[in-house]
Image: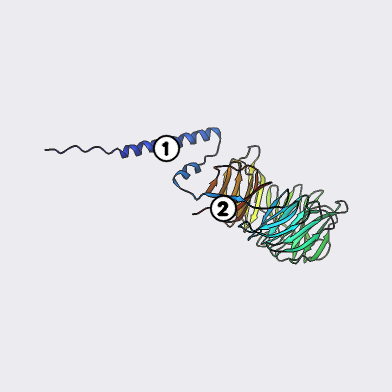
Amino acid sequence: MFGKKKPKKKWHRIVGIAFSLVSLIILTYVSISLIAGRQVNFNWFTSIFVPTAPIEIADELPFYVGRNRTFANLGDGIAAAGTLGIQVLDHNGNETLRDAFRMFRPAVSANNGRAIAFDIGGTAARVFDSGQLISSIEASGPIVSASVNQRGWVAVSTQEDNALRGVITVYNDRGIGMYRVNLGSGYALSAALSNDNRTLAVLNLIDTGSRVALFHGLRGQEPDSEFILPGSLVLDIRFLSNNNLLAISTDSLIIIDDDGNGSALFEFFEKRLSGFIIQDGVIILNLMDYGVGHVGRVVKLDERGRIQGELTTNREIISMSYKNGSLFVLRNDGITIYDSEFNELHFYGENPLSGLTRVLALDAGVAVATGEHLALAVRVNDD
């Protein structure tokens, strides 16, 4: 005698149907993306099954430095410069330094916990760290740029004699003037001091292109060597952590040796350089395709020019910043955090914040997003 027939299990049929629907959705998405010429991105799909720690947007940080604010990372604090002076807050929003002085076009440059705030086109500058004002500088001519090396020495570039003569002044870590050089000709764009305080590199424009003059030993008025890039524009010069001098041009990265010889570190002739970061021993380039909207790639290099990570993008990058293995990217739809290999970790876009123009990485998973009237703490909430 047979017993009662057991009911059939239907769970496997449900799983099969669900799998078919998911496969159909993915196939449809890929087909539409390929037809439309868009990048195929599965972050929306993987985020459904792989939970990520949410990004927390905290209250606005209380910076009161006037208009045209610009920001810099001091390690244990955040520096802000504006038309009314400078201010430093710690990562909890507590004020640790404030100094009031007038600037019309404020700028700030920082390195290894030391910063210089200066008025582009004016003569006022302040050197400071997170807790104290180190020196007040009154330049002899309109300031063009200023930089800080790893030891806290600064180089200030000015224009004198109705912008016909470039002058660079080097100050030590106590704010005392140590060296001054007058360029015979050419518009001085910027200057950088080596991390051992032994070499001053000066970038200026000449009739035939760009010139980088090297002054070894911080003595004399004539350069010991020079590098000339004819018919092209060098945008900036930086001494890397290994003390090599890097020149960033519109189509390549160039290492310049002590004798003024240049060698290509990385070339991108078929791309447009939209932005770059030099931080923590890495170089990050935002390279855009010509004539194809916002299509391009973000490339991470080590200081020897070897590619360490690559990110393809087809959306406008408003700002990006890197610190301790975290890459923060600000776009119109929100903020994305990538790891050191450019894998997407977290995204904040539930309520895209208008008015943001820059993101500044402070540490791994910690940043500040800023605009003309906003300064918001951004951190990954691992709780």
Residue 379 is labelled as 2
Residue located beneath label 1 in the image: 22
Select label 1 or label 2 by which is in front.
Answer: 2
Percent x, y for residue 197? 73, 65
Q: Nearer the viewer, residue 262 or 295?
A: 295
In the displayed structure, would residue 303 be above or below residue 172? Answer: above
**Horizontally, is 20 left or right of 47 in the view?**
left
Kindly identify the residue that appears in the image at 62 percent across and 52 percent down: 368
Kindly identify the residue that appears in the image at 35 percent across and 39 percent down: 15
User: Quadrant location of the N terminus?
Assistant: top left
Residue 213 is labelled as none
Percent x, y for residue 207? 82, 48
**Dot 1 crowding, Cα within 10 Å, few <14, some 14–19, many 20+:** few
Q: Amino acid at mark 2?
A: Arg
Mark yes or no: residue 366 visible.
Answer: yes
Q: Amino acid at mark 1?
A: Val
Where residue 94 sits, quadrant-wise, is bottom right
**Dot 2 crowding, Cα within 10 Å, few <14, some 14–19, many 20+:** many
Name the element at disc 1.
helix
Q: Nearer the viewer, residue 226 or 297?
A: 297
Name the element at disc 2.
strand
Kindly identify the residue that appears in the image at 81 percent across and 66 percent down: 219
Percent x, y for residue 244? 68, 60
In the displayed structure, would residue 162 be above or below residue 21? Answer: below
Kindly identify the residue that appears in the image at 68 percent across and 46 percent down: 373
**Horizontally, is 82 left or right of 180 in the view?**
left
**Horizontally, is 226 left or right of 45 in the view?**
right
